[in-house]
Amino acid sequence: MGAWGSGIRQDDTVCDVIAAFEDQLKAGKSVADATESVKSKFAATIEDDDDGSLFWIALADMQWTYGSVESQILKRVEEDFAAGRSLARWEDDQRGLSRRRAALEKFIKKIAEPNPRPKKPPKIVVRPPKFQPGDCLSIRLSNGQYGAAIVLAADHSKVEYGKNLVGVLDYLSPEKPNIEVFRRRNWLIRNHHNWMNKVDLAWYVPSRFRAVKDRLEIVCRVEILKTDPRESNSYSGWGGIGEQVIMQREWDAGRTEGNQANPRVV
């Protein structure tokens, strides 16, 4: 956990509390119920010397965003500021400390009055996975050629963020891939730069799908095999799908030219 700026929401802990609060609102809970829920969920955070003040800032931010801040929560934020608890992380950075103090002063002044234009509670946006397991994708790449990938899994456990596990194949051609390309399962192994012979395998989330959907086409379907990759710790947006095959081919070509220019003497 950490901060990446002096702004009120530029902190991991604050963002976590905000996300949990809004999840409760999306589930139909009231602001009061959401408040009690996050207090329970972040009980350990509240007691933490470093993160406790951040919890109350986040909670006050959410209450104000959707109406007004309870008096006891406003008082806690004010007390943490006066005691320096909400400034502690910036003590070793005088410029950052000055910006943080100014941001908190502005924030406290704002939340001291009810929000004149409170937001409506957010609603759940259902985003199912874009493809089904076994879908074989033809990908029109940035250089005008085609790549290929197999959809290996679909996960809709988080209704707003349906995702697909996709394995990219070592295919680059002016022609769209046919079913034999997918049956061969020639996965793209990346060893360019620092990839260390890793298969191009990742979970693809909804990000940027609309911008790329016209470049993706389901050309056939195959059965998912027991030998197919099933897990990945990598996540990606759809915008760059397949592009690694171009980089790998360029890398391989460069190494070949280098070897020809500097032949080994045996």
Image (cartoon, rainbow, N blue to C red):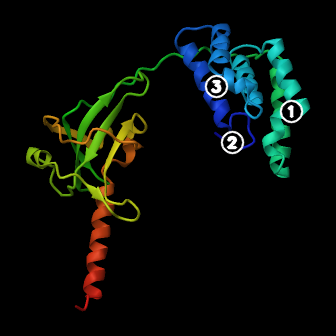
Q: Earlier in the sequence, mark 1 or mark 3?
A: 3
User: Which residue appears at 71% of the width and 21% of the height?
Assistant: 59
Q: Which of marks 1 and 3 is in front?
A: 3
Disc 1 versus disc 2: nearer the observer: 2
* Rendered residue at 16%/48% (across/down): 185
- Name the residue tied to disc 3: 17
What amino acid type should be assigned to the residue bearing mark 1? Glu
Mark 2 lies on a secondary structure that is: loop
Q: In which quarter of the image is residue 233?
A: top left
- Name, please, the residue furthest toward the left: 180
CA gap between label 1 and label 3 equals 21 Å
Sort mark 1 into few (<14), some (14-19) or many (20+) by Cα contacts within 10 Å.
Answer: few
Q: Which mark is residue 3?
A: 2
Question: Of marks 1 and 2, which one's residue comes earlier in the chain?
Answer: 2
Viewer-closest of 41 and 79: 41
Q: Is residue 211 visible?
A: yes
Question: Which residue was labeled with disc 1?
Answer: 105
Position of 71 compared to 4: left or right?
right
Q: How far apart are marks 3 and 2 (CA)?
A: 14 Å
Front residue of 16/104: it is 16
Place of residue 252 in the rendered image (x, y in percent of width and height, measured from the top left): 28, 69
Q: In which quarter of the image is the N terminus?
A: top right
Q: Where is residue 151 in the image (x, y as percent from the top left)?
A: 24, 37
Q: Is residue 200 or residue 46 the one in the foreground?
A: 46
Q: In which quarter of the image is residue 166?
A: top left
Residue at image coords 64%, 8%: 33
Q: In this view, does 249 lie to the left or right of 161?
A: left
- Check whether the beta carbons of the residues at disc 1 and disc 3 lie within 8 A of each other: no
Mark 3 secondary-structure assignment: helix
Q: How far apart are marks 1 and 2 (CA)?
A: 18 Å
Q: Does residue 112 appear in this view?
A: no
**Which residue type does callout 3 highlight?**
Val
